[in-house]
Every structure is written in C-alpha cells, then in structure tokens.
Amino acid sequence: MTFRGPRARRQRVGAVLLLALGTFAPAGSTPGEGRGEAGAACEGAGLEPGRPATDLYCVELVPTDAAPSAAGTAELRPVPTPFGTAVTRDGEHVHAVRVTARGLPEPSSLGPYTAYVAWATTPVLHPVVKLGALGADGVAEGRVAFNKFLVLVTAEAAPDVEERAGRLVLRGQSASMLMQPHDLPFILAAAAAGGDSAGGHEHGHAAHGDAKAAGAPADGWIAPPMHPKVSMPEALMRFRPGVAPFLPSADPATLAEARPRQLIRLRDGDTLRLEAGLVRRTLRGRTLVMYGFNGQYPGPLIHVDQGTSIVVEFTNRLDLPTAVHWHGIRLDNRYDGVPHVTQDPVPPGGSFTYVVRFPDAGIYWYHPHHREDIQQDLGLYGNLLVRSPRPDYYGPAHREEVLMLDDLLLADEGLVPYGRDHATHALMGRFGNLLLVNGEPRYELDVKQGEVVRFFLTNVANTRTFNISFTGARMKVVASDVSRFEREEWVESVAIAPAERYVVDVRFEAPGTSVLENRIQSIDHLFGYFFPEVDTLGVVRVAEEPAVPDHGAAFSRLRAYREVSAEIEPYRRYFDAPVEKDLVLTLELGELPFPIGPLVRMDSLYFNPVEWSGTMPEMNWIATTREVKWVLREPATGRENMDIEWRFRVGDVVKIRLTNNRYAAHAMQHPIHIHGQRFLVLSVNGVPNENLVWKDTVLLPVGATAELLLELTNPGRWMLHCHVAEHLEAGMMMVFEVAESG
Ligand code: C2O
Ligand code: CU
Ligand code: CU
C-alpha cells in the first residue's frame, strides 16, 4: 500500500459530494471550511492575495534513497495566539507544522518498521522534537519553535516511539536555513570602490560615495552606534543619508528638565490644556533636547469614564507643525487630528480645540500625526485610560500600572538626528538602542507577595515590536486595543507591535525580584545567523509581606467575557462572507544609496516573520523616504496608497484581506492601523481566530495574510496606514470614506 495524500482525499470528497448533492466540487477545493478557505502555503507559488508566502511557510520534503518516489511538504501554519504572532518567551517563532507525505512504501519494506514519524530538529540535529506519527492519510501535525530547522520523516518500529532511530525517508529545511553569510569580499570591494572617491575614512564624520553624490550635507549628522553584538566592516560604515539632518534646536540650558507624567482625572465636559513643546531630558548621562506634552514624559496620563467626553485645548510650541491624534478612539471625525485629512496642521504657535468622546473602555493613546518619526520618537505620546462603569469589568487586582514601551536611538554625542525633509530609516524603521518604559531606561515597582498587578501596555516605538515578560511571575492576557478578549488566556510573554495595546494581569508569587525583560531573536544579516537578545526594562521588587486581600484563587481562574462574545455574535454571519476589499502590502525601491542596494538584494532570500531588532544600524539609517516607497496596493484597481478609493456607509460590515508581500525586495512586518472604527481579526494564514477581540491595529508578519471584519459606525474620512512611523512617512497610507447611513 502507499499512503494517500491530501489531494487524493479531496478528490474523493469531491466525488462523494458530486454523488450526494449532484453538484460539482472541483478537486483541490476544501468544501465547508468557510473562514480561511483561501489557499494554503503549500498550494501554488508566487504572490496571490490571500495565500501565505509559499517559500516561507511551506517546506518542501525531498526523498532519500530509501524511498525515492516519495514526496511531501511541511506546511507552517500560525498557532492560535492572542497576539499578532506566536512566539516563545525567548522570542522564537512558534509554528504549527502539518507534514503531508505521499508515495511512501509500506514501512516494513524498509526494515523492522511499522510506521512513519515526522520530526523537527535544529541544524546541529539537537534537540529533536517529535511532530507526530503519520496517519493513514500521510499527515502528521505538531509544533516547532526553532529559528532554523530541519523536518525529517523516518520509518520507525512503532508510531509511539519517542526517539528517532529508524530510516530517513524524507527531509526538508526551513526557509531560515537559506540565510548564509554574505559575499563579503564582493561587498567590501564594491564599498571601497564607492567610498574612495571622496577620500577620508573617519567613521561617521566624512561624507562618502553615492550618499554624498545624492546631496548629503558635509556635516550635522551623528552616526548611529554599531549594534554591540554585530560587527560591521569599517568600509560599510562610512555612509550617511542623502538628506539634511534635523534635531530640535534650542540651548538645553534655557529649557526646563522634563517631569514624569502627571495623572489627570477628567469628568464629562472638563477641559484639558495640552501643550506640545521642547523639554530637556537627561538620559544615560547625556543632556538632550526632546519634546513633551505639558513638559512631561510621557504626556499626562488621562483618566476618564466610558461614555464621557472632554475638551482639549491644544497649543503647538514646537518648531514643527503638528496635530494630535487620539489613537483607537471612535470620536468625531473632525477631531481625529490628521493634518490635511481632518484638519489643517497646527503651525508653531497655533492652537486647536479637540472634543474627545470615549465610547469604549480600555487603554488608548494620543500622539502627533505629522512626522511621527520625529515628534512621537522625541517623546510626544500619552495614554488615556477609559474606565468602564462596571466594577467587575476586569478581574480583581491590587493595583494598575500603565506602561508605555519605547526605544530611542542614542549615540555618544547625543541623539542621532532625523531627516529634515525626508525620514531616514525608511526600510526597517528607526530601531532605538535604548529601551524605555514611560520614558525612563529603568522601570521600578514595589509589590507585596502574591500581589496581582494589572498592566496596561502600549507600544509607542517607531518600529520595534516587543516581546516582554516578567521573570518568575504568571501572566494572563485580558484585553487588547478596543475591548476585552472573549476569554482570558495564560501567556508566557506579550508580543506587542507599534500602536497595539494589551492588558495583562500578573501575579508576583515569589518574594525577591522579578525582572521585566524584552527577549527576542535577532539576526546578523551579514553572517546569516540568529542570536538571542535580552534587555532589562525594569524590576519589580516583591516583599515578603503578603498582599491583602489574597486574589490568588480569582487570579488562577481564566474568566470568559460573555458580553464580548454576545456583542460579537451578530457579526458571525459575516465571517464566511466573501472578501470585499483586498490590499497587498509591498515596497517600491528607487535608487538606493550604496551599499544597501546589494545588501538588500542578498537579504531577500529569507525574512523573519517579525524583524525584532535593528542589527545593522548604519545600513538601516541611510535609506530615506526619497528612495523608498512603502505601498498599500489594491489588486482589483491597481491603485496605491492615497489613490485608493473606498466608500462605505455607516452600518456596513466589510471583510478586508491584507496580504504582506514577501517577494518585495525587502519585506517586513507591518502593524496596520485603522482610524475611527474597530475590527475583528478573523483569521491569519487561513487559520481562524478562536478568541476574538476588537482591535484597531493588527500586526501582519512577513508573507502572511489576514482577514479582518471591519465594522463601520463612524462617518467621516478615516485613515488606514502602517504604524511604523517611517513606513507611514514612506507613503504607506490611504483614506476611506464613510457616509452617513440612509
Ligand atoms: Cu496611532 Cu494614524 O495613528
Ligand atoms: Cu489612530
Ligand atoms: Cu510598515
């Protein structure tokens, strides 16, 4: 006998349907799956909206001599997760693996074997994890969380063996195995040729090569420091962006040192005066000129009640035009704070009055919507905590902490300047090298033993996705952007993309110290390997004294939020509706400054689903929005970005499909944000989401596809854009119109 593959099975299903219903079901379609019916990674190739990237998410299995006519695939599918991507606490991506084999001989024909078993292992063949025994259909399913890995199928004595001992019949390797050291001599030779014409070799100070030809000023730039764990050839570090630098100019001695944020409690109809201005900050011993709201870092923490509204009298005391956007809040369109879309930019010295209403409980934030890459990065961000009237809205906790996660790019000489007229870091976004919690390099908290702390987390970084956890403490996720989840879930870490929010309850059970960490897997692109990075963001000191009352029992139960499910219920009938709007996320490259052109081209063999860190700060720095255009493309019309025309009516419920094009010259994850409305993430790579939550921002990993159900309740002209500040600056945005109903 031979094992039967999925195609044969489907044909059989099709034939049965044909007989039973008298209808024709084409081979290859899987009837009745509904949501996520779109093509799987192992069916087809190339960019097709709705299909995950084949080369990243489908491992081709190649036979050995033992079974030369066998073939197969290992499809990497998303693991259900409350976050945009499933990762371990250490930051390794977790994949559900579906191994499908066909053409295998009877195992006993190869020796003393009765079964085939699928395994995954690292390039050094240790450790080995069992994915599972192949069923009669030739399919095995399991999970893998290695950066680089091999998939093996072996003949074994029994399906339940725990260790690999039998003959290898099929094997394949993950796409990440394709990452190899770059052709360094070539790059170096080219770099030398490109750089010598300008003479001078001092790192970070001389203008060189094409960057200079493109019009770089002679000075004013401070180069980003090298990544501490990634060495770069000197020849690759002599370049600078071909645009003029910008830093707020003021004598720090004339500025007041910024103060930590203030908590402001506002009631219905109250007015807040909000001023954006220059502040002095001292970070890592350097005196910096930065921005702040009301002289604070972050901006004031605003506490309000759900259902109320406030008035914000805003004044711009910056040296740039600006406007304030109220992220995630379904307010009146004219107060949405988007220059040229909902208002004119507020010039330096000007003011604007916002009326902000709060229909939804949860954690929200405010930030400028003009040159975010500069203004938000320099400290213009603040949280709004919107309280539900229901005391049991969340489970019991001893206290609540509101944390804004950020990073800042700091060199010895001070802040790395921004591009004055065009953003730098246009490919990957501006990764910082100093991680900040509420604007400080070190967060501190004192709690009692057994204390349950509710953390409201907001990622305000330009591009960095965090993967944070507390050592020695249990954590459960309760809510995200615009609502609670249908059900709480235990999590080992929180993967949070720019602009996303998560609410987690954490119980500190053991006295001592619990460390707030960011744990990720970074890539050395030059040498093609992964390495772990662990950053300490803060410490929680846990006293011996027990917390009263003891919330231990309540904490150990996962609560189901039936009101959330009930509220979603009327939308379920749309879950299987056809996709109404398609967007492909992609990139158009102009003439890139040398030497990133050749580097980018060589890098494109593999992209991590999420790029967690910027390991080539000099290379990332010099591509600007003059050369790089990030694109939302509508395949049906061929339109891009601001040329896309979507028109809806209040009351519409629309299925939108996003596909992140992995075949672009440089691919990256994109946190896609929609203003003024809320949506559900129905599925990722065809795998339905079983624990729904209302969102305003969704992280789309490289080569992934997601289906969103967008509810349109709020009339006006609203933005849809990538929340990587530099991608937004590079054009990755569109506006859609929602007309009043009737
Ligand atoms: Cu956080 Cu367009 O916004
Ligand atoms: Cu927004
Ligand atoms: Cu993006």
Image: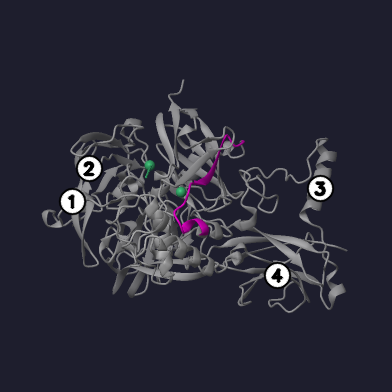
Foreground disc of the pair 4, 2 = 4
589 inside magenta stretch: yes
| Closer-to-camera residue (659/640) | 640
- The residue identified by callout 4 is 152
Residue 727 vs 605, above or below: the answer is: above
Residue 437 vs 331, above or below: the answer is: below
| Closer-to-camera residue (349/623) | 623
Name the side, left or right, on which 23 lies relative to 557.
right
The residue tagged with tag 3: helix, strand or loop?
Answer: helix
Q: Residues within 10 Å of mark 4 (few under 14, many from 20)?
A: many
Q: Are marks 4 and 1 in contact (CB under 8 Å)?
A: no
C-alpha gap between disc 4 and disc 3 = 27 Å
| Closer-to-camera residue (91/253) | 253
Q: Quadrant of residue 6?
A: bottom right
Q: Quadrant of the N terminus?
A: bottom right
The residue tagged with tag 2: helix, strand or loop?
Answer: loop
Spot occupied by residue 630 in the image (x, y as percentages of width and height): 47, 45
Q: Amino acid at mark 2?
A: Leu
Foreground disc of the pair 3, 1 = 1
Q: Are marks 4 and 3 in contact (CB under 8 Å)?
A: no
- The residue identified by callout 2 is 266
Foreground disc of the pair 2, 1 = 1
Name the side, left or right, on which 350 lies relative to 155.
left
Q: Residue at x 28, y 39 (%)?
A: 323
Mark with earlier residue (4, 1): 4
Numbered label attached to residue 295: 1
Q: Are marks 3 and 2 in contact (CB under 8 Å)?
A: no
